[in-house]
Amino acid sequence: LPRYDAMYEAWDGKRVLADDAAKAATGVQKIVPVPSRGFGAFGKAVDEALAASKKLYLEGAASPAGRREEPRFDLETPSRADALASYAAAKKPDVEITSIARAIDAVRGVKSPYEIEMVRRAIRATGDGFVRAMRKARPGMWEFEFDAILQHAFVDAGATGLPYYPIVATGENACSMHYVANRTRFEDGDLVLCDAAAEWEWYASDITRTFPCNGKFTPAQRAAYEGVLRGQEAAAKALRPGTSLMELNRIAREAMEKAGLKQAYMHQYILGHQVGLNVHDAGGARFKPGMIITIEPGYYVKSEKFGIRIEDCYLVTEDGSECLSADIPKTVAEIEALVGADYR
């Protein structure tokens, strides 16, 4: 952890330091300062650890010998983990450097009842935001206006932050998966894709809804939307302990193709992810009871200037799953009744 730095604290505020307070808060008995240059006291701690073990667990680093097969130009600055891996290998050539990711997956993937409740609260706040903002949606609104209404509602509901920057993408903007400029006006006839969520006590949620800004799907928009919804429903029905995202992706894709969605890009192998302390949380490849994942099939047609994504959070149960965001309007009828309701 860092040392106390008066200049840092004057500009950016207090942070957790390498001191007794951190030991008391975390239960970790040996905490050393992050070195400003070289390794210093941190290096001595590593030396002691290497003397006692041939294995070093690191986040975000591979063995220096196996990281790259040939030299290449790289603009990225080496990470602390890379530097530590090189240091350890030089000190002890037979050291086994292992990613800590699997260990983190094991302890972070399955959520405790407390963690599940925190995600539920984040989702409830998210639902408040979607309902409030969609009621006010109309042609002529700006993407950033819709975003502002969402975030205001999140705070009103008690949310403590945002797990990621909100995506409010109208028309062709929705064909960029992580569009966050939010600087385009809703035009009559546009579909708006909104991927936004609240955070509750550091626990994330992740929800996406797509809606016509004028409150009425065209026949083509409705057919595409319902095709994506069929894909999500098929994957959700198949979700249970032992399944994987790869399997759910195949099921969703088959359902969408059966609904006639064959000629445009659909999510491939990224049908969803785990949710928890991070919006893309740690967790194993096979689902276990207590894991929380998203299912978010998408259909994007740049030539027609629209993209559709429907995303919900699901809790894996002993014999299936529970949609934690089931109360957030999603069907065509629910969306058409909601969008613009404050002006009707």
Image (cartoon, rainbow, N blue to C red):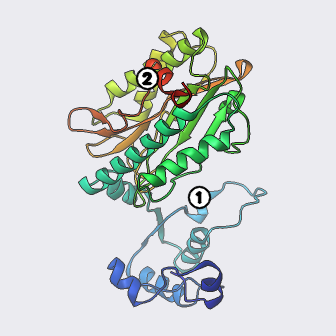
Q: Residue furthest left?
A: 318
168, above or below 258, in the image: below
Please identify the quarter of the rendering in which residue 182 is found: top right
What residue sits 67% from the left and 23% below the top? Answer: 190
Q: Secondary structure at mark 2?
A: helix
289, above or below 320, in the image: below
Locate residue 228 relative to residue 116 in the image: left or right. right
Q: Residues within 10 Å of mark 2 (few under 14, many from 20)?
A: few
The residue where tag 1 is placed is 66
Residue 280 at what x, y percent from top left?
A: 48, 49
The amino acid marked with disc number 1 is Gly
79, above or below 294, in the image: below
Residue 157 makes an appearance in the image: yes
Q: Does the residue at mark 2 contact the one at mark 1 (Cβ under 8 Å)?
A: no
Q: Residue furthest right?
A: 73
Name the mark on residue 245: none
Residue 300 at what x, y percent from top left?
A: 63, 24
The foreground one among 119 and 239 is 119
Q: Residues within 10 Å of mark 1 (few under 14, many from 20)?
A: few
What residue sits 59% from the left and 50% below the top? Answer: 165
Residue 217 at what x, y percent from top left?
A: 57, 16
The amino acid marked with disc number 2 is Glu
The residue where tag 2 is placed is 334
What residue sits 76% from the left and 56% below the top? Answer: 72
Q: Secondary structure at mark 1?
A: helix
